[in-house]
Image (cartoon, coloured by chain):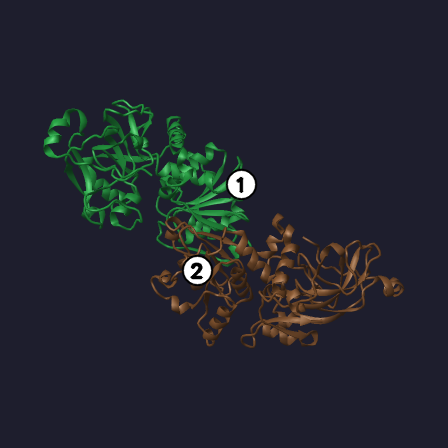
Chain colours: A green, B brown
Amino acid sequence: MAPPLSRRLLPPTLRALRRCYSASPASKAVIYDEHGAPDQVLRVADVPPVELGERDVCVRMLAAPINPSDINRVEGVYPVRPPLPAAVGGYEGVGQVHALGPAVTALLAPGDWVIPSPPSFGTWQTYIVNHQSVWHKVRTDVPMEYAATVTVNPLTALRMLQDFVKLNPGDAIVQNGATSIVGQCVVQLAKVHGIHTINIIRDRPGSEEAKDKLKQLGADEVFTESQLDIRNVKSLLGALPEPALGFNCVGGNAASLVLKFLRQGGTMVTYGGMSKKPVTVPTSYFIFKDISLQGFWLQKWMNSDKADDCRTTIDYLLGLVHEGKLKYEMEVSPLTDFSLALEKAMGKHGSHPKQVIRF
Amino acid sequence: MAPPLSRRLLPPTLRALRRCYSASPASKAVIYDEHGAPDQVLRVADVPPVELGERDVCVRMLAAPINPSDINRVEGVYPVRPPLPAAVGGYEGVGQVHALGPAVTALLAPGDWVIPSPPSFGTWQTYIVNHQSVWHKVRTDVPMEYAATVTVNPLTALRMLQDFVKLNPGDAIVQNGATSIVGQCVVQLAKVHGIHTINIIRDRPGSEEAKDKLKQLGADEVFTESQLDIRNVKSLLGALPEPALGFNCVGGNAASLVLKFLRQGGTMVTYGGMSKKPVTVPTSYFIFKDISLQGFWLQKWMNSDKADDCRTTIDYLLGLVHEGKLKYEMEVSPLTDFSLALEKAMGKHGSHPKQVIRF
């Protein structure tokens, strides 16, 4: 995994000498000095210019999302997080090449769009200087908010569809939390590969509208949890095959519903716990139904051998965005509105699409 | 998998003609006509002689255990069970070759000890007639109660140690329900392979004695559940490595304790649910600790390709018994005491060793 997006401060005299050709402009960053409630500890601060090493690239950030894992890192409840104090928030995003160190060999030119790949700490700032190997050039014919968010959520969806169970066209999967961005990506990526999706969503005002939206994205079936409060959920499958793979990002009852749908020998992959309730499994599911339970964490996957083709996969996903086969709602706000966007991302103003900061 | 140990009834005249050379003696069997409480529905009945086919072998049963799964089959709560009415109980056991059909090619002679392998329904009877392919000849220099019980419990222990995680000498595993026969076999088989065991047992009168017994079998550490009611159970590991593999036959809190011991990326295999409580897993265990949960069921394993070497494995296990490296307590009773043995097996008279019926 690449090192954190560090900022090497220049001594003032040297900085003055080299600013024009080998240092970043002064930057603004969203930083925190201690863990705590993000709306308490995060602040926008001025950051001095940073020297470019021989093979460094200075990138002017265009956009970066506020993901739930970013919030968890600031809270300090995430097992991997940047060192304090003066940690810069954010983990993924897209930027434009601003300047190149004199010995950069990567095929990069000013104006190119690049993303840190694998993603790494500190994307919530206007300028980032880091080694050329950190940056992956991406196409510019997609909305920048998609390039900014392609790694964490769409890549999670694709990996979970491909890495646990061998699926063939015509097979089915089941998932809860289907209205989440990962959930929406699962629906669309499954459709691209000919896989049917059975989707479980919360009971709440607007659930009918949410069902329609998911069906427009290609969902085969969408149920609210209360609709599944029956003995034999499989009677609802109709012509769909019993799913061999399930995704759980909720826990509690919603995880039990995924398990109920799974076929003999099926696998449930847990990648989130939105309900903050654990996963509870009757013994008979393990013994007689031969169910396997596993977890997926993108940050761990990024450290594995399998991540070698990460950039190829990102290009594939952005290709799908370009073709209109992968989409999800986002709300883009300027850095000056960071506080409000953060509150929305934290759910303090009801339901909102994913919040993306434009720098 | 072999067909059930069926009994083909002879017409009376033919039976009289052929009894001396091609039919079994009349037999006594423990049968049930409907599912229910085993002490209500099971009865010892006379069964008429059975014709021997060309390649059939008539076996005089010597001994068969009353396993918990036998009880569950009679109760009707087990997903696989023999058809009613007149189902004969029992699933494993050992017998002595009594007579051979005229075209038997297997290297069997009267007096040889044989076990049904894979095990199959109907071992609770004095004579069984079945195809030669059902019977596996075993050594006679071990106590017959071990030959009668080698398949279900010791084989489960060995398969769980070998089929889920690649263990090397010096590694450790953790298990609950360690005083069960499978648990005792796990301790001893692990020791044979240089694997350390961390064992969890119930808090109950006599738990200190149970600890001593397990340590005499080779257990490295034995804890009662209440001893593990601390924040950091791993502080108790001392020089032992964190276990990569755990076995759960209890559920509830005892399963959570196994999970607490497991190392990053570890696997817990569930093969029983003695507490009748489900397995509850915090989301973080899946995502950040990368724990996998799987199940093991011998009856399913027997239907898999992996079961091809079942008989070789049985011979290996009986070899360990012969060498004194695999032992567990059993109580042997005559068929006339079946009712009492059944009550003991059902836990109606406190704690008893495994009940084995001698025919």
- Taking the view exactly as shown, the residue that stands out farthest to the left is A13
Q: How many marks?
A: 2
Q: Looking at the picture, which amino acid does disc 1 mark? A: Leu
Q: Which residue is mark 1?
A: A240
Secondary structure at badge 2 equals helix
Q: Nearer the viewer, residue B7 or A176?
A: B7
Q: Which residue is mark 2?
A: B258
Q: Nearer the viewer, residue A335 or A9?
A: A9
**In front: label 2 or label 1:** 2
Q: Is residue A182 above or below residue B307?
A: above
Can residue A300 be seen here? The reply is yes
Which x, y percent locates residue B66?
63, 68
Which x, y percent locates residue B53?
81, 56
Q: Quadrant of residue A32?
A: top left
Q: Looking at the picture, which amino acid does disc 2 mark? A: Val
Which x, y percent locates residue A48?
14, 35
User: Viewed as shown, does residue A337 lie left or right of A226?
Assistant: left
Secondary structure at badge 1 equals loop
Which x, y percent locates residue B24?
81, 64
